[in-house]
Image (tube, rainbow, N blue to C red):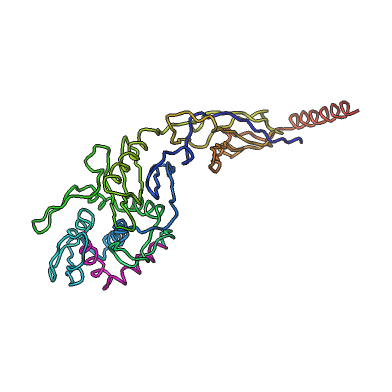
Amino acid sequence: MILRLFIAAFALTSLLLQPAFALETTARSALVIDYNTGTVLLSKNADQPMPPASMSKLMTLNLIFEALDDGRLTLEDTFRVSTKASQKGGSKMFVREGARVRIEDLIRGVIVQSGNDACIVLAEGLSGTEDEFAKRMTQRARELGMMDSNFVNATGWPDPGQEMSAEDLVLLATRLIEEFPQYYGYFAEESFTWENIVQNNRNPLLGLGIGADGLKTGHTEEAGYGLVGSAVNDGRRIVFMIGGLDSALARSTEAERIARWAFRDFEMKTLFKAGEPVDSANVWLGATKTVEMALANDIELLLPLRSLDEVTAHYTYTDPIEAPIRAGQQLGELVVLVPDSDPMRFPLVALSSIEAGGFMERISAAGDILLRRIRAATSGG
């Protein structure tokens, strides 16, 4: 039996998967992903811990949403406002000391008004103290795979021990979207009124008509201006984080530019349909001499509108393939190669079953081997 590895190569001229072709950003750190596919569109210092400012409130909300989800809390439950909470500086919901405030109102105060006081009320109500709540935030971050995050408070108040990476913030935002759709709508509220005080959502993308529906801004002197955002357009969702901008205007401008670019310059395309033959392989000792191969699943990839000639793909399989062969059996792989990216591999499967051949097929195969050996000996002499 003579085996050979068959490799067929062809070009894909319009495939983008990684940030080698991404746009430049003035943010100190940034990460943009396509939510549906997980494709990274832009990455800059994404794994470096940094001060997250109020963006760390997303972790506070995650713990509250989890408590709501497992029945430890309801939206109608109330927590008492402590002296510490009422006197906390920075952005505020303006809750009064001694008052009891509904969980739902506190959530809206955190999301829309970025209320530090509301965060502390939630932290103390759930864990007894803000310190204990912050320890649980760090522990839960580790459990969720957020290895670059550490928390010492529930608000994002400046502290050397409070840090998160862009990767962790995008992971967390993705979790909030995916796991808590019943609460995610709060992030799209453009204003919230408490005690006759109207405050607008600080997210600059809301209301621009680009499908923005979350999540959270942040700002301190050390952290600069940052935003964890998400938007949906024509069924595609992006999730992103930018941080370290110099001003609120720079944050707003850069966030809008990145969101529009992510939607404008990329499109989902189906490169291959499952079940459509892409090649045929020879069959060894089979009832038939060839078997057709196809992709096991549709291959849909996020493509740029510009051509990328460097991207190629090939399929590999061992030829001939010994019978018996069952329909759906993997016979090889389609390998897509993108510069600066790991290869992507997709299984090639048999389209039909091939039974082992009978006596005459085996005699014929033996004759083929003998003939090849004779030819090889003759050419070598």
Could you say which is closer to the camera, residue 162 or residue 368? 162
The answer, for residue 293, to whether it is visible in the render is: yes
Picture coordinates of residue 290, whole percent (x, y): 65, 28
Q: Which residues are magenta?
A: 115-142
Image side of residue 122 versus residue 306, left or right: left
Residue 123 falls inside the magenta stretch: yes
Tell me if residue 94 comes above or below residue 234 in the rendering. Answer: below
Image side of residue 164 versus residue 321, left or right: left
Picture coordinates of residue 105, whole percent (x, y): 17, 58
Tell me if residue 363 comes above or below residue 139 in the rendering. Answer: above
Residue at image position (39%, 43%) is 25
Residue at image position (38%, 44%) is 26
Q: Residue furthest left?
A: 196
Residue 347 falls inside the magenta stretch: no
- The quadrant of the picture occupied by the N terminus is top right
Quadrant in which residue 314 is drawn? top right
**Magenta portion: prevailing SS class:** helix
The answer, for residue 70, to whether it is visible in the render is: no
Picture coordinates of residue 239, whole percent (x, y): 35, 46
Tell me if residue 309 comes above or below residue 138 in the rendering. Answer: above
Residue at image position (31%, 69%) is 133
Residue at image position (26%, 66%) is 72
Picture coordinates of residue 365, whole percent (x, y): 76, 30
